[in-house]
Image (spheres, grey):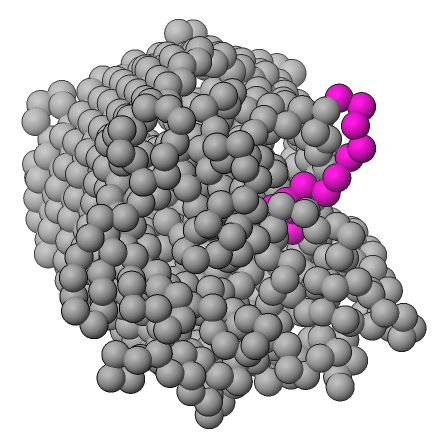
Amino acid sequence: MHKSIIPKKVFKKTTIATLIFFLFVTVRAQNSIVLDTPSDTSDLESFDEVLVSSQRFDQKRKYSPRQIEVVGAKRLAELQPATLGDALINSGQVFVQKSQMGGGSPILRGFEASRVLLVMDGVRINNATYRSGHTQDIITIDPFILDRMEVNFGSGSTLYGSDAMGGVLYFKTREATVGNFFVKPSATVRYSSANSSLIGNAGLQLQSQKVGAIFSCTRSQFGDLRSGSKNYSNWDTFGLLPKYVSQINENDTVLVNPDPKIQQGTGYTQTDIFAKVSAQMGKFHHTINFQNSFSGLIPRYDRLSQFNAMGLPVYGRWDYAPQRRGFLGYQLKTGTNKHNIRLSLARQNTALARVTRNFKDINERTQLDKVKMLTLNLDRHDQLANGLILNSGLEFVFNGVISTGINRNILTNTLSETQPRYSDSGATTQMFSIFEQMVYSIQKTGTVIQVGFRMANYRLEALYSKSNPWKLPFSAISFQSIAPSYDLGITQELKKGLMLKASINQAYRNPNIDDMTKVFESQPGSKLVVPNETLKAEQSLTVDLGFLWRKDNRFAFEAGLFHSHVRDLLLDQPGKFNGKDSFLYDGRLTPVYQIVNVAVARIFGFYANAKIRLYKQLWFSGSISDTKGRYAKALGAYEQPLDHIPPVFGQLSLRWKAKDWFLEGQCLFNGTKKAEEYSNSGEDNQNMQPIGLNDINGDKLADGFNPSWQCWTIRGGYQPKSGYNIALSLDNIFDLHYRYFASGMSASGRSINLSLGYRF
């Protein structure tokens, strides 16, 4: 048996040493001699970068009272991510959970899935079926089409409405510019050895005096992922897949896996299409934005790798098939820099089917959910006086959900109706909001004050037929709420380069179709979630305190504390269905759970980021984040661990950059997640973590312990603005076999990644 690569005590020492190193290199950089030689300062320029996520309109990052991380197109090209989830992982500031390779569920400050808002070019992506567990919708956003990705940490409901309790992931697509005529094609091919993946992208940009256009098409093909060979746990067999199920002559057959490190049933394919056309017509600027993402079968690896006590697979099939996201948007801009208006209209269509079948069962169930979402955003920006800005607007969002269920006999191909995931007669939500945001800058004192307020009216209605398959005791579920939210923030420049930041933000999340109407077997035979018609909206109050210290083009150091108080938090708890605490579902008598509002929860933690120029073109960067979460079912009741709370995590890197060349060494690290820190809800997938481990002293730890780990990567390349470009990386250099907290699959083993491209 291998000993744990990074024992608990060693990791604590490593964390302390990391913080000391932050301070050491900061002081060294401050006292170093300013060099006259040219140097790449892209790591620091991001603090002066103009962002759009903070105020919906332009604002410099350093003046925002919030913690914001920016991942630009140039950085995305260096990272060569298979999906945006992988790009967020490498930022070292966002934790990402994975249940299957075609997945990635970002966690911001202990909030995940439907409590993190995704926004595309000012338009919300979250729809009425976003679940509170783990989602994979971020993989439908193509990294090749982005100008940048902004991670706005902390409550964002004042500007963006419901769901932004943990923060906002803002995706800004590339602009179709107007100007001197040109035509610029581009092409990129990427290969990764860990899953034999091949990604190809072809793009075209056209520009004229009045019309600009961008076209992009990406095809991704991923094979089954190979995990590392050196296990981070005491159990050499943890995470290995010795056998798997496959259909031979329409019969489920258990096969021996010739290489247990290969996670059979993780590969999938995906195609992404993007087109954007802009036209300048007098004082008006028009933009049409089209996106379409569609994937083949995406196997749910965490379910397919489950075996019962007799050593037989639980499922013969569990796939997402299909997964689709369509986006068609129109935007109109008019006005001057001081006074302008932006109108955004968008129609989004998503389709997600869950195809499941128990092992050796001839009946295969398909639950297909289709969502049509219509959005209208009207934003106005006014600079009323020197230093006084008002950003205001209104938003309307409509969701229509159609959920169906079909059983298919795989031998006779006979079809019959079965229970859908949501209400069987359709469901809708409507939300209308107005908001106002004031930004007041006092140049003499270096003070920036931000105050905002939003009021939202939300309605939900779900209908059930008299013959609904669950025999629910009601024919409809209705919900209505009026939810206010507000924020107050201040940044104070104490001296040049040193700024203090503080903010208080109220956020909310309305229960959606997934919360109120789903029937879902969260854990086979152990947990069946059924509808609850008595829910209330969640509300949180978050306080942020932090500072940013920056010195010329030599270093920047940012750190802060945060605390969120959540009331009426939605959690699934043991319940009853038609008066019974268990229900026969898929042939298994399963305990019943319902989503309910518990009393209170608190989430708190700290973060620290450093970007430092050590010598000429040599840069150091590092980040560390730690979050804790507790909840109580009633006021004054015993506190329990909250789910979705990752262990301490971060990254350290050294990066050399000169002209168009770069070379970087990076270490991603995760701390320990002890068994007693797991939530009892099951959302953290404790049963999929190492069991029966011993600590460094040989004492037995409780089941479901997630050890600490470090993963090392080296990458480099040549990235000019035009011409040939290349990027090469060696990920997981030491071939460590490890698993991210709450994930149902192991991470990639050692992998050689190569990207070749050409831009005119």
264 over 97 or under it: above or below: below
Q: Viewed as shown, does residue 440 lie left or right of 295?
A: right
Q: Which residues are magenta?
A: 635-646
Q: Residue furthest front?
A: 579
Is 185 rendered above or below residue 249? above
Q: Can see residue 607?
A: no
| Nearer the observer, 612 or 22 | 22
| Residue 605 placement (x, y as % from top left) | 72, 40
Q: What residue is shown at x 23% (from left), y 52% (from top)?
A: 406
Residue placed most toward the observer, 520 or 489? 520
Residue shown at 64% from the left, 27% from the top: 598
- Magenta stretch: includes residue 638: yes
Residue extending farthest to the top is 384
Residue 692: x and y, percent? 77, 71
Vertical relation: 495 (above or below) 707: above
Q: Quadrant of the N terminus?
A: bottom right
